[in-house]
Amino acid sequence: MKTILITGATGNVGSEVVKALKGKRVNVVAAVTELEKPELHLPADTERVRFVFGEEATYAPAFQGVDAVFLLRPPQISDAKHLINPAIDAMRAAGVRAVTFLSVQGAQSNPLVPHHAIEKHLEHSGLEYTFLRAAFFMQNLSTTHRDDIRLHDDIMIPAGNGRTAFVDVRDLAAVAALTLTGEGHVRQAYELTSAEALTYSEVAQILSEVLRRTIRYPHPNVVQFWERMHERHQAVGYVLVMTALYAVAALGKAGHLTHDTKRLLGRDPLTFRQFAQDFASVWEKAPA
């Protein structure tokens, strides 16, 4: 039976990939940073192994007996050359055959994002690879920017008036499961989006309608964004990557839509309104 290791298994994306692989004839192993810590996002029977980018002692035990890896760059890691690429080399040395890498839209031509360096390294690694170049996650608004909406009724993202292509993480995970278990995906790059590109003013309008209160998009500049992220105690490297990605949207270059998600899944992608309805409870105001 094929063994698949999921990095980032306890996060929004990785946990959905684990769920998407359940029921398939594969052995799923979740890479976690702490084995003793209970993980509410994972099914109780999920096999786990300790793995930490940058801790080379965790590499060989984690990759032993693994056939394929779902590779996800932790958001706080911006130094791909020293923290991600050596792990890729260790995969190859341990006998891993294939990697599905969660990248971002436009990574192939944007050296400012760490995904660019990871893609280049995978292309020369000797591993079979598949790139999932994902649009902006809808779930970023229910996690990273949740408190902006929940506490301040605003969306503090420096994306200007540009349109952004979104993708629901549940659709992304379903595609990842296909590439990890199916045939015909080697050396392929899929650009995963929903069927609509929205401005953040339109996002705010949809959230206002679903939540039945006014959510504003105040068109923050980069300084205002950094101030809010500083209040959230976010790492500088993480905020730098976010700023680079939002700059692409502000320049009007983040709205490209594709049919890859629909073609691969054989159905329409989930819409932003459906996402907002499904996750409405995370933005509810705390009782006074």
Image (cartoon, grey):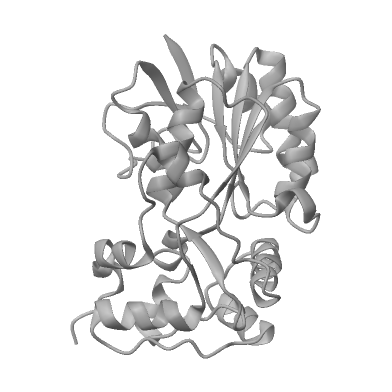
Q: Please indicate whether residue 272 sits to the left or right of residue 188 in the image.
A: left
> Where residue 115 sits in the image (x, y, percent)?
70, 48
Question: Where is 89 relative to 7, above or below?
Answer: above
> Where residue 246 sits in the image (x, y, percent)?
64, 71
Q: Nearer the viewer, residue 238 or 153?
A: 153
Residue at image position (38%, 47%) is 170
Residue at image position (61%, 27%) is 99
The C terminus: image quadrant: bottom left
The N terminus: image quadrant: top left
> Where residue 196 sits in the image (x, y, percent)?
46, 65
The count of marks equals 0
Residue at image position (64%, 62%) is 238
**Which quarter of the picture shows residue 285?**
bottom left
Q: Is residue 285 visible?
A: no
Q: Is residue 219 visible?
A: yes
Q: Please indicate whether residue 219 sits to the left or right of residue 87 in the image.
A: left
Residue, far top = 1
Residue, far left = 287
Question: Where is 115 relative to 61, above or below?
Answer: below
Q: Nearer the viewer, residue 97 or 231?
A: 97
Question: Where is 139 relative to 162, above or below?
Answer: above
**Which quarter of the picture shows residue 239?**
bottom right
